[in-house]
Image: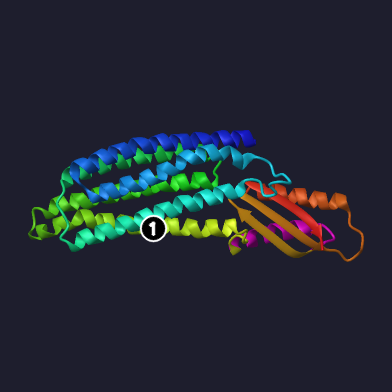
Amino acid sequence: MKKDKLQIEKRILHLSFWGSVLFIVAEGIMAWITHSHSLLTDCLFDAADLVMIGPFLVLVPLLYKPVTEKHPYGYAQVESLFLLVKYSALLALTCNLLVENVKLLLHGGHEVDAGDIAIFEFLVCLGCLFMYIVLNHYSKKYESTTIKAELYMWKLDIVSSIGVAVAFAVQMILLRTPLSFLTPFIDPAVAVVMAVLLIMEPVKVIFQSIKNLVLFAPDEEVVGKIREIVGSHMQDYPYEVTFLDVIQTGRKLWVEVYIGNQTDVIHISKLHRVRDEIRQELKHKYDQVYIEIIPD
């Protein structure tokens, strides 16, 4: 099972990697030809993301290694650390691009060939949509935190490409109106909007990765669902839950259920049975689950 998941994840990352290479080269060439800052922003953001995929292809097998005494949490935190580094770099790059394009706006903007960019971005949108459909097909068999991040990036590329295409189509219309004086501001304005939208996801992932690295409990919604599942199974046994300890790091989830008992007798076979029942249900919701039932 783990081998199948590893193969699926590696296949998705390889497809995403080579798809990104193709689009980055195309965007880089088009940005150089048209001198478009919005194309350059998109190209640099995708390039930074691509640089991070390469090392992670090497790290993926580590995430499937079993827990040992030397590594009690396995290598789960490697994924959280990787996402923290990746999105910190993307955040820094995006902030820099945002500042540069705001400066360009304040200095009067600049003209670009709106028609060529609009057609190019429409074609890019179709290409990104194709890649998203292919990757989403494979992800139905297995979807890790990293795969979700890759799918999000392709979805973002689809939305940003169509948005840029529409913006430059509007610029072509403005050229034939009294508002033609606004056209020099379209390209840097689009780049600023893209940068603002691109900032949101890195900030969110950075905070989540920090929580995972310092072994904080996951969101209250996750803890609540786990508490509900544990409680429903405990109803069939003579035990009550006194404390629930939940830790999530990367794709792995550790659950320690502390139980109380009205007598001094603990049936090990019953503890194993309820543990297996809870684990089986949690496996349908979370990727790699470790659960222990501990008498309080």
Left or right of 32? Residue 142 is right
Return the residue nearer the eye: 275 or 255. Answer: 255
Return the residue nearer the eye: 96 or 151. Answer: 96
- Residue at left 47%, top 48%? 149
Q: Quadrant of the N terminus?
A: top right
* Disc 1: which residue: 199
The magenta span reads: 221-240
Query: Is residue 257 at least partly visible in the picture?
Result: yes
Please say if 3 is above or below 46.
Answer: above
Q: Residue furthest right?
A: 264
Return the residue nearer the eye: 82 or 168. Answer: 82
Please say if 266 is above or below 68.
Answer: below
Q: Is residue 243 found inside the magenta-colored segment of the image?
A: no
Left or right of 113? Residue 214 is right
- Residue at left 54%, top 35%? 8
Q: Quadrant of the C terminus?
A: bottom right
Quarter of the image holding residue 188? Answer: bottom left
Q: Is residue 234 found inside the magenta-colored segment of the image?
A: yes
Q: Position of residue 42 (x, y in %)?
A: 31, 48
Density class for disc 1 (Cα within 10 Å; few <14, some 14-19, many ≥20) is: some
Give the amino acid at mark 1. Ile
Q: Position of residue 38 (x, y in %)?
A: 26, 50
Q: Residue furthest front?
A: 70
Quarter of the image holding residue 232? Answer: bottom right
